[in-house]
């Protein structure tokens, strides 16, 4: 009888260890990204494009609802290095994303999508309100999660982001016209999450 109770205790402990990775919980994450993109300015029915390379950092706080569904809020900062002129522009974005993970193996692919509120830093001189440009971001992507243990995950991802900025009214004193600006990003990223 004693052997049976020991086996039952070992089985219960094993079950709790194997299912703990699938339980719900919160996490903190840090991601580093890089890639390229294009800025498009549309004014008077003409488009002007500028290509850039960028680096990105993202700090995230998320919730794992179950072994397939995750929700995440994050703050991202992009440093843009344009090909055609010197200097560095910065864009920050607060994002809300949803994740759908597949499988429950050591390598878990996922798909994600979401939206965000973005700020184009140091652009207040171009707006009537003397505030930096604001915009709406939409992003989709895919990646792979590598669980290291019950508390740590590594992540590799690819993401496409599009930001549509508020229109800028440009005037020469006689007439005014709107300048529409947008940015696209093609981003590769790596990161880590701590689950608690």
Image (spheres, rainbow, N blue to C red):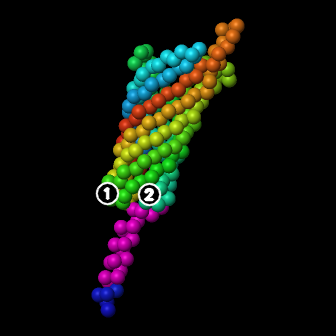
Describe residue 69's horizontal placement relative to residue 136 as left or right.
left
- On residue 106, the disc is 1
Residue 3 versus residue 19: which sits nearer the camera?
19
Extreme residue in the bottom direction? 1
Extreme residue in the right direction? 174
Is residue 159 in view from this perspective?
A: yes
Describe residue 157's horizontal placement relative to residue 72 as left or right.
left
Residue in the picture at 49% in, 17% down: 48
Residue 111 versus residue 33: which sits nearer the camera?
111
Going from N to C along the chain, the mark reached first, 2 or 1, is: 2
Describe residue 104's horizontal placement relative to residue 71 as left or right.
left
Residue 190 versus residue 48: which sits nearer the camera?
48
Q: Which residues are magenta?
A: 6-29
Most common SS among magenta residues: helix
Report which residue position mark 2 lands on. 68
Q: Is residue 24 magenta?
A: yes
Q: Position of residue 39 (x, y in %)?
A: 48, 23
Quadrant containing the N terminus in the rendered view: bottom left
Residue in the picture at 51% in, 40% down: 75
Q: Nearer the viewer, mark 2 or mark 1?
A: 2
Residue in the picture at 42% in, 23% down: 52
């Amino acid at each position: 009888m004693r052997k049976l109770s020991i086996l039952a205790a070992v089985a219960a402990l094993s079950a709790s260890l194997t299912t703990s990775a699938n339980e719900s919980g919160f996490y903190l994450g840090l991601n580093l990204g890089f890639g390229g993109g294009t800025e498009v300015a549309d004014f008077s029915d003409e488009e002007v494009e500028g290509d850039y390379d960028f680096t990105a950092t993202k700090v995230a706080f998320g919730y794992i609802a179950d072994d397939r569904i995750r929700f995440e809020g994050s703050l991202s900062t992009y440093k843009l290095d344009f090909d055609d002129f010197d200097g560095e522009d910065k864009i920050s974005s607060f994002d809300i994303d949803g994740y759908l993970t597949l499988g429950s193996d050591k390598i878990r692919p996922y798909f994600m999508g979401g939206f965000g509120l973005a700020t184009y830093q140091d652009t207040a001189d171009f707006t009537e309100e003397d505030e930096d440009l604001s915009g709406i971001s939409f992003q989709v992507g895919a990646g792979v999660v590598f669980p290291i243990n019950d508390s740590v995950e590594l992540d590799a991802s690819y993401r496409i982001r599009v930001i549509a900025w508020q229109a800028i009214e440009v005037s020469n004193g006689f007439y005014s016209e709107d300048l529409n600006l947008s940015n696209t990003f093609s981003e590769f990223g790596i990161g880590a999450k701590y689950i608690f």
